[in-house]
Image: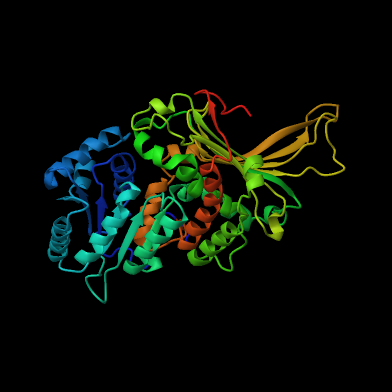
Amino acid sequence: MNYNMNMPHKKNFNAPTVLTIFGATGDLMKKKLTPALFHLWNRGWLPDKCAIVGFARKDLGDNGFRSMAVNFSGGMAGIVKKDFESFAELWRYQRGNFSDSNSYAALARNLESIDEAWGMCSNKLFYLAVPPQFYEEIFTHLANSGLTKPCSDETGWTRVLVEKPFGSDLKTAERLDAMLGKLFKEEQVFRIDHYLAKESVQNILALRFSNSIFESSWDGRAIEKVEIKMLEEAGVEERGAFYDRVGTLRDVGQNHMLQMLALIAMERPAVFVASEIRKARAAALYALRPVSRDQLKRDTRRAQYIGYRQEGGVSPDSKTETYFRLAAFIDNPRWEGVPFNLESGKRLNRSVVETFVTFKHVDPCLCPPDRHVQNVLYFQLQPNQEVAVSFWTKRPGVAMELEERPLALNYSGIEKNGELVDAYEKILLDCISGDQTLFASTEEVMASWKFIDSVLDGWKNNEVPLLVYEPGSAGPIV
């Protein structure tokens, strides 16, 4: 792995590259991709010859697309408009419909014209910033139009970036992967889970495998439990129609939360390269014990906030969960008997993404009479990025009294100074350079769905009641 982020010194990184973004007028482009691409350009981290081609239905043209980009910049703090206008010169536009073969033919001509202007074959990166239901038809048309074929045998790669969720269950994920397999090799497919690109998540690997004080006690003999929480004060907002088809477990449980679980549970890779790290993560996910019928009733909860059915796009008799809690277990010697407790929900009393690794207390223990002290390793991803470990020390004074003190690494200062690389910046940078470390492999996706399906199948059969909870609460009372 390359830990030097001062400049992406990667083989062939500076080759001419064209990034085509499907769904280029949507929220993802506005809120995430535009700021990320600008910051990469402003730091000099994009290839010297780079073009950004938007593909969407609106009738904009190149100048209209560039004007839209400048308007997007209005929500970005500290941006000089003149600088952004220079950046927007990289932008080009192709009006088209995802289901129209002629639109892809026009896109192909557009990309060819860029290569002709540069006088060379460029790398082609296709980013699907669209809802998952459009994936299959876009992939089909990309293949039929010849856009997935490199423009030269000697130079120029083609890669595809796919947002989550990848499928809606194991069956649909397998069908989508089979289609991808006909068009691309595994090394060309970059399945995005932007949580993997956050600094505090990447630090799980660094802390585990670069510090012997943790790795030597990283198992069920020393660890009591692991908790992974993704809690939100917001509701489904304008995503009602999408969310009602998906639910919280599919939306964040199958991807973000299980990827964090995999980083905590994985074995040490043979070498620190993308293929071995992804193989180790997949092995941890395949070791997840399918949720049995008895465990389903005992260890899973699902609920819906009051008022969800009145949200725009939501069915008035919806059974979709906006909250879940479950205990996952890993069937291998390292983690025997250790629960991985996952909890996520919307319209709760706080917004936070955090992971706790709670160590067992020493027995006999030098403890206060009313409690056993325990060390906790803590990772916070939102609202701040922080890593902390709690220690118990003697409180100053004559009495032998213990108090808990954290040792913390907080990224807020780094973020304010502009040194912290945003998750989407890291995603784009790694895809251009060909580093798949922070992207989910086929094996990881399939292993995740296999586990999640064991929960969803039971919920579908109403073996676990759908509870309700008050917006702004801590969740259902059970």
Relative vertical location of residue 146 with respect to residue 238 in this rendering, above or below = below
Against 191, residue 63 (above or below) is above
Q: Is residue 100 left or right of residue 403?
A: left
How many discs mark residues in the rendered view? 0
Q: For this rendering, which residue is in front, 389 or 126?
A: 126
Q: Quadrant of residue 370?
A: top right
Residue at image coords 37%, 49%: 425
Residue at 40% from the left image edge and 67% from the top image edge = 186
- 231 or 87, nearer to the observer: 231
Q: Residue 334 in the image: state x and y as whole percent.
A: 70, 58
* Residue 16 position in % (x across, y down): 24, 63
The reply to whether residue 3 is visible in this rendering is: no
Q: Is residue 315 left or right of residue 263?
A: left
Q: Residue at the front extreme?
A: 461
- Side (left or right) of 394 relative to 143: right
| Percent of width and height locating residue 94 | 16, 51
Residue at 43% x, 48% y: name it.
194
> What colour scheme has been applied to the protein in the rendered image?
rainbow
Residue 276 visible? yes
Along the line of sight, the residue nearer the viewer: 344 or 369: 344
Quadrant of res 9: bottom left
**Where's residue 332, x and y in %?**
68, 59
